[in-house]
Image: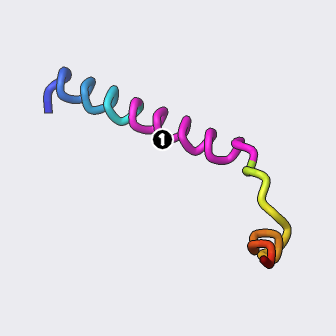
Amino acid sequence: MNGSATTLMVIVQVAVICITGYFFYLVLTTKPKPEPDSYSENDEEPR
């Protein structure tokens, strides 16, 4: 493999690792949406 192919391979691998790391960071730091405590709070009111 010549020098330009090795350089391109390294650049692509570093880019993929950075993008993957960024999305893992977003997933791990995003606050969860507030959810009701139980399913009974989602029930319709009796008519």
Residue 10 position (above or below residue 41): above
Q: Is residue 16 magenta?
A: yes
Residue at x 18%, y 28% (from the top left corner): 5
Identify the image quadrant of residue 44.
bottom right
Q: Is residue 38 magenta?
A: no
Of residue 14 and residue 1, the one placed in the foreground of this image is 14
Of residue 10 and residue 35, the one placed in the foreground of this image is 35
Identify the image quadrant of residue 7.
top left
- Is residue 18 found left or right of 34 in the rendered image? left
- The magenta region covers 15-31
Residue 30, image x, y percentages: 70, 42
Q: Mark 1 packing: few (<14 Cα in 10 Å), some, or many (20+)? A: few
Colour setting: rainbow
Residue at x 74%, y 51% (from the top left corner): 32
Quickly name the residue at label 1: 20
Residue 39, image x, y percentages: 77, 75
Residue at x 78%, y 77% (from the top left corner): 47
Residue at x 14%, y 26% (from the top left corner): 2
Residue 24, image x, y percentages: 58, 45
Residue 34 position (above or below residue 16): below
Mark 1 lies on a secondary structure that is helix
Query: Amino acid under label 1?
Result: Thr
Residue 6, image x, y percentages: 24, 29
